[in-house]
Image: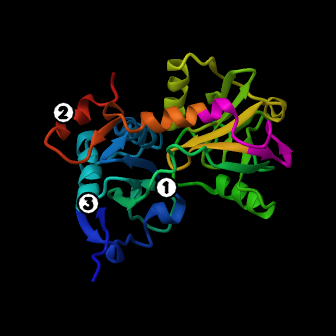
Amino acid sequence: MEKEPLIYLDGSFVEKSKAVVSVFDHGLLYGDGVFEGIRAYSGSVFRLVDHVDRLYDSARSIHLQLPMSKEQMTQAILETLRRNRLKDAYIRLVVTRGTGDLGVDPSLCKAPTIFIIAEPMASTLGPREPKVVRLITSSVRRDAVDATSHEIKSLNYMNSILAKIEANAAGADDCIMLDHRGFVSEASVSNVFIVKKGKVSTPSSGAGILHGITRSRVVRLCLDLGIDVQERDVTPFDLSTADEVFLVGTKAEVVAVGSIGGLKVGDGGAGPLTRRIYQEFSRMVQRPEEGTPIYGSDNGQRVKASQKA
């Protein structure tokens, strides 16, 4: 009989079928918590230090005190992968406010709930061209930065879910979301890049975006390749007249956009700059310095040193 995957839950490892949280957990009742989606490639966790840092920033912004140090959280992630004998995986790290009552008051939650899920996931990166998707522009606006800001990677994803429902109804793969001013923000769960005359642009923080780990690395990759890249306000006009559009994210990796609202982007396929970034990113995620090794005796040192250069 095949063994069940093991889930990290509040300091213990339990079988998937036994990994449960209380119905009074505020993460379930109110979406009160934070999370990270993380990738492992060939036995190394991509940008793990950055992901853990972002988790703690998100938790701090909602006044959620984590009971573990960053080092302890890092080791819990790595041990979850080891227990499941994984080298290529998608990791979901979740911290909720914890068990409380039916009231919204977070002070009644005695301790956070922490769980880590790791599942095998092969990369779509490689010698092939990037996947090409069809988008619409959603009527659902991205929440403003002074509301439920998407700079916080929280468990409240209703804004994205409503936009995704609209995309599904239109027969599209995903959607572009605008901010409250009408500028381009991001896709439902991915960051957006446009290419015009060889220059790359991506929406800035003011558009209510998540500060994506993959987005940040792609910006730096463009600079390393000598590609002109800037973070700025991007208008719907910029989007509709772009030579190329692509999406990036931890799970999506790098995806080309073929059309938006039925209007072709370029020739409707992956443009030359998108293909180049896809190929360079494919090679980059395999480099030892880009990740933290899951197995081996140098974990403690690498966790501290990795990704800081």
Q: Residue at x 49, y 65 (%)?
A: 28
Say which mark, if any, is on residue 32: 1
Image quadrant containing the N terminus? bottom left
Pick whichever, 179 or 28, lies toward us: 179
Q: Which residues are magenta?
A: 258-275
CB within 8 Å, label 2 to label 3: no
Identify the amino acid type marked 1. Answer: Asp
Which residue does the numbered mark 2 point to in the structure image?
A: 301
Q: CA distance from mark 1 to mark 2?
A: 33 Å
Circle 1 Cα neighbour tier, 10 Å, few/some/many (<14 / 14–19 / ≥20) = many
SS of the residue under disc 2: helix
Q: Residue at x 33, y 25 (%)?
A: 308
Pick whichever, 146 or 253, lies toward us: 253
**Can residue 92 be seen in the rendering of this structure?**
no
The image shows residue 99 at horizontal and vertical percentages of 39, 64
Q: Is residue 201 above or below residue 184?
A: above
Label 1 or label 2, whichever lies nearer to me, is 2
**Can residue 19 be seen in the rendering of this structure?**
yes
The image shows residue 202 at horizontal and vertical percentages of 65, 29
